């Protein structure tokens, strides 16, 4: 059997796995969802879901990857009991990675575009909200502009992956993650020292108001929190399993998962510290959806002393977060062809690069040329929204359920095999007392919240 590439260090594994998790789910999607669903009260529900759903399933993904030494396209087949059909889930996980990138490449292009716009002075002091909104609307309405920046994002991602695991993915992601954390801390300090009503933003963010949960609808909020907990960790479609296949048995997997979740949560939390005090300090609504990052915050930045530099750094921070996930998932996609079809890394990179350029175009055109399509808001409202909906609120939770059942069922890999793999090495052991909860309670919770969320889309459940 061909020797599998390995990370050069434990730090590399943690930073790259965290980089996959730390993406737009943390620094863009998380803040505007928090704004939409009432601030701190939503955060509490999200953190509970992260601990009871995300953490154990992340450990299971790592275990499946490390035990099989394969990407998800072959992982189940390598360790499933003879005669079982767990590998039938693999094509859906492969599809999930491609679907995720079909809109993620476009949004990553937005971030890179805004770094350029701020750095070159497109945003100027004195611009009205309408003018700032016009920059964003003009970008979305221009398919050539969106295509150009999407292509740049795709070329950067596959370019890094073409250099290999250690010399490309690991080395460059380490640099980006360090830069991301440094910029983020600087921006948080700047936001917290704005004065005025910034403290009101902290209260909104940190003091729970459960009345706002009721106003939004409990089922809708639970469904959103579940989707976000899976989306932020990139679990359920094998994005973590691939990195499990690249690590040795020197460290226990639960402790590594805890470290990654803590780093992921720290970044998401700090993103809120950047955004919400700034919104309240300048009297703007923090629940404005996607426009929060691309309209509201640019309008705030141009009012600040040194706003051009602040804006450039902010979108550079978002770009690093987006690219860390982009590179990690592209590595996963490349490994599918290497493991499943026996392709070389070079061949897999070139073919997938071309495929991704084509597959990203529906999301590009859905924002302008095809924006007339009558897509219900509850299902995304646009082509990229549909792709996001399919991944974050369907494939991620259902894929997570597959990993959960595979690692706990006697007809799957089984609890004993999972624990033996998870606890190999040094570090924090997986809590064995959680067996009953993971085997009998968590699957039911995932199914119930998933079904309730779908029913709420049709107005059947609303309370």
Image: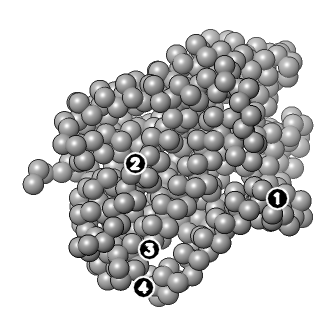
Earlier sequence position, callout 1 versus callout 3 = 3
- From where the camera sits, is residue 329 visible? yes
| Residue position marked by numbered label 3 in the rendering | 405
Q: Residues at badges 4 and 2 in contact (C-beta under 8 Å)? A: no
The quadrant of the image that shows the C terminus is bottom right
Q: Which residue is denoted by mark 1 in the rendering?
A: 459
Instruction: Indicate whether 306 appears above or below 37.
Output: above
Q: Secondary structure at mark 2?
A: helix
Q: CA distance from mark 1 to mark 3?
A: 30 Å
Lower position in the chain sequence, tag 1 or tag 2: 2
Q: Secondary structure at mark 4?
A: helix
Image quarter (top left, top right, bottom left or bottom right) of the N terminus: bottom left
Q: Which mark is residue 432?
A: 4
In the image, what residue occupies the spot 23% across and 48% down? 339
Structural distance between the alpha carbons of marks 1 and 4 = 40 Å
Residue at x 23% of width, y 30% of height = 347
The residue where tag 2 is placed is 94
| Gap between marks 3 and 2 measured at Cα | 19 Å
Mark 1 or mark 3, whichever is nearer to me: 1
Left or right: 197 with respect to 274?
right
């Amino acid at each position: 059997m061909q020797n599998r590439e390995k990370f050069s260090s434990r730090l590399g594994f943690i930073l790259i796995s965290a980089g996959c998790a730390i993406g737009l789910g943390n620094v863009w999607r998380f803040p505007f969802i928090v704004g939409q669903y009432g601030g701190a009260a939503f955060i509490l529900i999200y953190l509970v879901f992260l601990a009871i759903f995300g953490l154990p399933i992340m450990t299971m993904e790592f275990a499946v990857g490390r035990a099989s030494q394969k990407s998800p396209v072959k992982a189940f087949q390598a360790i499933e009991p003879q005669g079982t059909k767990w590998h039938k889930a693999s094509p859906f996980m492969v599809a999930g990675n491609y679907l995720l990138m079909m809109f993620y490449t476009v949004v990553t292009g937005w971030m890179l575009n805004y770094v350029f716009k701020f750095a070159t002075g497109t945003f100027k002091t004195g611009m009205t909200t309408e003018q700032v909104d016009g920059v964003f609307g003009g970008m979305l309405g221009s398919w050539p502009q969106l295509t150009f920046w999407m292509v740049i994002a795709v070329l950067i991602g596959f370019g890094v992956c073409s250099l290999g695991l250690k010399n490309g993915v690991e080395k460059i992601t380490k640099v980006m993650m360090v830069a991301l954390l440094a910029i983020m801390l600087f921006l948080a300090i700047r936001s917290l020292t704005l004065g005025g009503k910034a403290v009101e933003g902290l209260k909104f963010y940190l003091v729970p108001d459960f009345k706002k949960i009721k106003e939004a609808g409990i089922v809708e909020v639970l469904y959103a929190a579940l989707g976000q907990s899976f989306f932020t960790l990139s679990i359920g479609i094998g994005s973590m399993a691939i990195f499990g296949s690249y690590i040795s048995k020197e460290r226990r997997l639960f402790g590594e998962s805890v470290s990654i979740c803590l780093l992921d949560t720290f970044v998401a939390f700090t993103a809120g510290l950047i955004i919400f005090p700034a919104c309240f300090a300048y009297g703007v609504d923090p629940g404005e959806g996607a426009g929060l990052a691309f309209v509201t915050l640019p309008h705030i930045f141009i009012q600040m002393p040194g706003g051009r530099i602040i804006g450039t750094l902010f979108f550079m921070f978002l770009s690093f977060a987006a690219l860390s996930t982009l590179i990690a998932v592209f590595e996963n996609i490349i490994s599918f062809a290497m493991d499943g079809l026996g392709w070389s890394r070079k061949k897999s990179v070139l073919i997938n690069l071309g495929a991704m350029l084509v597959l990203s175009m529906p999301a590009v055109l859905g924002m302008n040329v095809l924006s007339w399509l009558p897509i219900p808001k509850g299902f995304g409202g646009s082509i990229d929204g549909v792709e996001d909906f399919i991944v974050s609120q369907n494939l991620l939770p259902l894929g997570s359920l597959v990993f959960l059942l595979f690692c706990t069922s006697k007809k799957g890999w089984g609890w004993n095999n999972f624990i033996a793999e998870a606890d190999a090495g040094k570090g924090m052991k997986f809590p064995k007392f959680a067996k009953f909860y993971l085997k009998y309670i968590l699957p039911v919770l995932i199914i119930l919240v998933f079904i309730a969320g779908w029913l709420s889309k049709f107005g059947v459940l609303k309370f």
